[in-house]
């Protein structure tokens, strides 16, 4: 409410713009509140409420002295126009009904089905839980470095709710609202260019049907949140330059600054935004706004997004974190750039929900392997065309090559157009095309990068306006059928959360279902079930897990437990055994990111025994690249450190109480989870 009064006290009289300001102010309030509380290690519900009470009082005072837009005057001015358009175009009416049903299904998932996405269980939700536990953003010991070093603004949108309920009951709402917010921003942008209601609805219904957007709308991913912020920045910059106003430029810079603190992908969009903003200022000959945007952006970044980058620099000497995690995510190789682009373009042929295409994949992989294109794969394994309905793999569906790519390229030809509507819509194609070049250039090819295209397509969405035709054609019918297919199949038949199967499952069990195959559980399900039964309340449990082992279900399982993530080398070297009542180990190795640069490897291959010999017997550690290859040359960049977990060292202070052997379909090798209990003092 305070953000509305702040926004309505400003000079802008447009309802849509005032609501955009209110959204950005609300996000900023959350960020500032938690940053201030973190400085004093005071992230508690009462303190957060107090901060927002102060904001509310300030907003009321400001509004009473500078009344602007009346909150009661907000009218649904476009509803009647949209309804008339739907009545006149039966295709749009049909698709709007499917859109509504799809949104309702997504809302059901948001309300009743927790996320089982690996990234969310590995670091997004755990980092929020540890902030609440520690009452601060201060870095802590962890086995998952992403808990610490990644930008924090998107997770702060989860923290404001979880700080009160200590659960993830409403943690998926930010993505859901971001989905709707992105569509609203696209509609506002096209409406400002005076496009017809039918054309606007056509664009919104197509964009809203894209598999990647539907799937992320009920997840804890942050690509849609980033898309909302970046598109908001673009729209407000355009309004500022067109209408020669300074207020929108401040909020445009604010939106981009928040985005830089929400997800590092925002940095990859800087070249595209630089070009687009320059073209806008050249078109209107108002160059001062470019400088104003930069200066306001720097100030907003320092205030709202620099917190964790500063912590990274203090702790690791680099704003993005230790060299190991930077090396894994940055893989610039000009020689492999063409191959990387080809692999990304292959995923524009997205067959989400059409499993028959699976039979083509061995031939695609064989062809690409023969052409050495697969040399560009940095992380993961290329398996051919996607057919899964899953947020990590699905992209644009059948519309990738039928609509998205051709009209994005066509839009670029409109940049030189004298028609102002065509020009402003056409420049949006730059966002997708340039991102498709920057992404492989900076990060190489990885199967885990496809979801970043969700942000890119939101920015490029206005190019779809060129595909609309009033006449009923074969092409329009085909696009309509594909959009209808997406709205029906994507929300109902997700691989990790099939609608009709989740209805009969317990909420906590749903969280532990594998995100790719609903028929199996994550491996951590089995030791957790034993721990829930035998580990008492108020216990401190140390998890000696690897980087890719999921964490959050242990935090949710029992609110009285205190969960800590244990780096084995710290446990042994610092002898911190008294801090834990129980330990749980995941196998006999712990693979994690090294925190510091390694000066020498204290191991070598023993030619007699054909095994590794370690010079340091306290903690036996070797280093590897992202493929798991053991490194011996110090010049090679290690991305993983692997600790050998020796049970005899743990048995000096703990006793074994349970071994849980796990074998799953996707990881058929056995893994034994050992649960240790602290020895009682004699």
Image (cartoon, helix red, strand yellow):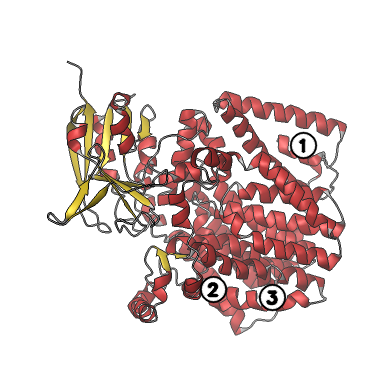
Q: Is residue 354 visible?
A: no
Q: Are marks 2 and 1 in contact (CB under 8 Å)?
A: no
Q: Which residue is mark 3?
A: 412
Q: Nearer the viewer, mark 2 or mark 3?
A: 3
Pick whichever, 199 or 230, lies toward us: 230
Q: Is residue 544 above or below residue 410?
A: above
**Is the residue 85 above or below the residue 666 in the image?**
below
Q: Residue at (34%, 24%) from the top-left corner? A: 538
Q: Secondary structure at mark 2?
A: helix
Give above or below for 654 relative to 565: above
Residue 456, percent across and down?
A: 60, 63
Give the spatial CA distance, label 3 vs label 1. Answer: 40 Å
Q: Nearer the viewer, mark 3 or mark 1?
A: 3
- Seen at 40% across and 38% down, the residue is 142
Circle 1: element type: helix
Q: Say whether disc 2 or disc 3 marks the residue closer to the N-terminus.
A: 2
Location of residue 303 (image quadrant) = top right
Q: Eyeballing the image, is 290 above or below 552?
A: below
Left or right of residue 162: residue 200:
right
Q: Residue visible at 75% across and 62% down? A: 277
Find out whether the residues at labels 3 and 1 contact each other: C-beta distance under 8 Å: no
Badge 3 local density, few (<14 within 10 Å), some, or many (20+)? many
Residues packed near mark 2 inside 10 Å, few (<14), some (14 to 19) or many (20 plus)? some
Gap between marks 2 and 3, in whole Å?
17 Å
* The image quarter in which residue 99 lies: bottom right
Q: Which residue is mark 1?
A: 5
Circle nearer the viewer, 2 or 1: 2
From where the camera sits, is residue 478 visible? yes
Q: Which residue is mark 2?
A: 400
């Amino acid at each position: 409410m305070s953000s509305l009064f702040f926004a309505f006290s400003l000079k802008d009289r447009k309802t849509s713009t005032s609501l955009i300001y209110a959204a950005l102010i609300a996000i900023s309030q959350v960020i500032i509140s938690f940053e201030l509380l973190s400085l004093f290690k005071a992230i508690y519900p009462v303190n957060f409420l107090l901060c927002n009470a102060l904001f509310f009082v300030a907003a009321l005072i400001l509004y009473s002295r500078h009344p602007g837009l009346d909150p009661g005057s907000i009218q649904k001015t476009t509803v009647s126009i949209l309804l008339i358009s739907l009545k006149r175009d039966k295709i749009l009416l049909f698709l709007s009904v499917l859109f509504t049903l799809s949104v309702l299904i997504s809302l059901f998932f948001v309300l009743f089905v927790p996320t089982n996405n690996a990234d969310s269980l590995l670091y997004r939700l755990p980092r929020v839980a540890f902030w609440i536990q520690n009452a601060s953003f201060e870095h802590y010991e962890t086995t998952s470095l992403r808990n610490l070093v990644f930008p924090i603004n998107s997770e702060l949108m989860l923290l404001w709710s979880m700080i009160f309920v200590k659960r993830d009951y409403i943690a998926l709402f930010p993505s859901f609202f971001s989905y709707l917010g992105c569509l609203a921003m696209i509609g506002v942008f096209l409406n400002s260019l005076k496009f017809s209601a039918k054309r606007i609805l056509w664009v919104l219904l197509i964009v809203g049907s894209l598999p990647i957007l539907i799937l992320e709308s009920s997840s804890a991913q942050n690509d849609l949140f980033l898309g909302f912020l970046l598109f908001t920045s673009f729209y407000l910059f355009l309004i500022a330059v067109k209408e020669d106003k300074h207020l929108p430029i401040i909020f445009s810079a604010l939106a981009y600054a928040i985005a830089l603190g929400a997800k590092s992908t925002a940095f990859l969009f800087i070249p595209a935004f630089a070009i687009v903003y320059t073209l806008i200022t050249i078109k209107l000959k108002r160059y001062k706004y470019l400088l104003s945007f930069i200066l306001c952006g720097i100030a907003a970044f320092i205030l709202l997004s620099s917190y964790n980058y500063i912590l990274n620099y203090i702790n690791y000497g680099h704003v993005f974190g230790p060299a190991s995690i930077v090396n894994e995510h940055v893989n610039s190789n000009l020689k492999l750039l063409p191959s990387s682009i080809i692999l990304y373009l292959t995923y524009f042929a997205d067959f989400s929900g059409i499993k028959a295409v699976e039979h083509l994949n061995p031939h695609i992989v064989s062809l690409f392997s023969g052409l050495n294109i697969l040399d560009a794969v940095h992380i993961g394994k290329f398996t051919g065309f996607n057919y899964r309905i899953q947020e990590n793999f699905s992209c644009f569906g059948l519309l990738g090559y039928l609509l998205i790519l051709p009209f994005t390229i066509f839009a670029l030809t409109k940049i030189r157009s004298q028609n102002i509507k065509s020009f402003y819509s056409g420049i949006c194609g730059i966002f997708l095309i340039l991102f498709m070049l920057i992404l492989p250039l900076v990060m190489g090819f990885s199967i885990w990068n496809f979801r970043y295209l969700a942000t890119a397509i939101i920015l490029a969405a206005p190019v779809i306006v060129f595909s609309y035709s009033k006449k009923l054609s074969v092409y329009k019918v085909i696009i309509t059928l594909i959009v209808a297919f997406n709205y029906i199949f994507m929300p109902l038949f997700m691989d990790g959360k099939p609608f009709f199967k989740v209805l009969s499952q317990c909420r906590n069990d749903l969280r532990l279902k594998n995100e790719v195959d609903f028929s199996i559980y994550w491996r951590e399900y089995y030791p957790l079930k034993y721990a829930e039964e035998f580990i008492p309340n108020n216990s401190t449990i140390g998890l000696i897990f690897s980087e890719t082992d999921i964490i959050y279900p242990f935090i949710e399982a029992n609110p009285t437990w205190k969960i800590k993530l244990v780096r084995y080398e710290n446990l042994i070297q610092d002898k911190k055994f008294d801090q834990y009542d129980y330990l749980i180990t995941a196998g006999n190795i712990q693979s994690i990111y090294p925190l510091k640069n390694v000066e020498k490897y204290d191991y070598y291959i023993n030619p007699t025994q054909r095994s590794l010999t370690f010079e340091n017997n306290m903690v036996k550690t070797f280093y590897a690249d992202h493929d798991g290859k053991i490194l011996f040359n110090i010049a090679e960049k290690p991305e993983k450190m692997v600790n050998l977990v020796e049970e005899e060292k743990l048995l000096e202070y703990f006793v074994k109480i349970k071994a849980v052997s796990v074998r799953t379909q996707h990881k058929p090798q056995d893994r034994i989870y050992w649960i240790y209990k602290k020895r009682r003092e004699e």
